[in-house]
Amino acid sequence: LHKEYRRQRQMCIRDSLAIPLLVRELGADLGQTGLVLALLEIGGLCAALPAGYLTARWSYRTSGLVSALGFAALSITGWVANEVWVLAFAVFGIGMSRALWSVSRHAYASRASSVAHRGRLMATLGGVHRLGHLIGPAVAGVLAITFGLQILLLLMGALFVLAALSSAIFLNEGWTSHRRIQFGRTSRSVSDGTINSQMFPQRDSVDRGPTQGVTSLSSVLQSQWRPLVRNGVPIMILCLVRKSREVVLPLW
């Protein structure tokens, strides 16, 4: 029975996230495990709007650097955790750092590219992200079986230190080749393919930078609560289905 348990556990590590198993190893029951895992998304939810505000106030380099270093520090905190509540704190902070990281990278990508290449850049960014999700669990499974589950949090922290250094060194915010883009009404001549004066890429002559046009969170919530609710509820339902593979399957 012990050999069969180890075999099933190794399969679970290879095929899913390790955090549910790590929480269980610290002595949590199923309800506590679900709560700790929920803190990852609760942290992201709490930090989503502030992340947009901070990205607008700070530079993209600063936002990426802060989120990556926060992610690394909290991953190491989870690595040394020997109590469930310490790991829960780390998971909540990781969710917040992940929100800032996601907002800052998409904001930078959209601003650093021209309109003609923005869709291709976003598709490439999403493809690279999913490639990491494909390679990461396979490598993590081998490491977890060999060295234990907690080594994965240490490795995650080290990778985000590398990401922070990359953001600090290689991120270009000179904006010499791309100016701020204003969007207007769109119309295109189908017959000859020409674009009239109201076609969307209308550019300012001066780049205003990320600190201009910052709107308060309260005004966003007051003016946009209908689309937030209308679009947010279906997204929440889809996320509930997607998260089942990361939570229900490992615990089962």
Image (cartoon, rainbow, N blue to C red):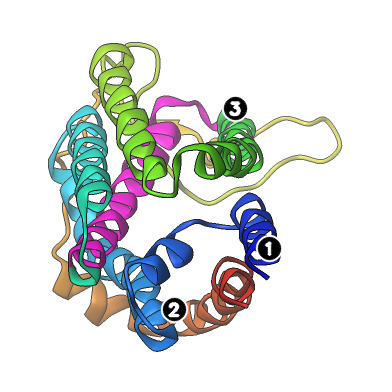
- Mark 2–mark 3 distance (CA, rounded to whole Å): 27 Å
Q: Find the magenta span and give its range.
A: 86-115
The amino acid marked with disc number 3 is His
The residue to which callout 1 is attached is 8
The residue to which callout 3 is attached is 117
- Mark 1–mark 3 distance (CA, rounded to whole Å): 46 Å
Of badges 1 and 2, the one in the foreground is: 1
In what quadrant of the picture does the N terminus appear? bottom right
Local SS, label 2 = helix
Q: Residue furthest bottom?
A: 31
The tag earlier along the polypeptide, 1 or 2, is: 1
Give the side of residue 76 with respect to residue 231, left or right. Answer: left
Give the side of residue 11 with respect to residue 210, left or right. Answer: right
Image-quadrant location for residue 7: bottom right
The residue to which callout 2 is attached is 227
Query: Residue 235, image x and y in percent?
Result: 54, 75
The amino acid marked with disc number 2 is Pro
The tag earlier along the polypeptide, 1 or 3, is: 1
Q: Nearer the viewer, residue 103 or 66?
A: 66
Give the side of residue 71 with respect to residue 30, left or right. Answer: left
Query: Residue 242, image x and y in percent?
Result: 62, 70
Give the side of residue 238 with respect to residue 205, left or right. Answer: right
Query: Residue 213, image x and y in percent?
Result: 18, 48
Q: Main secondary structure of the magenta part?
A: helix
The tag earlier along the polypeptide, 2 or 3, is: 3
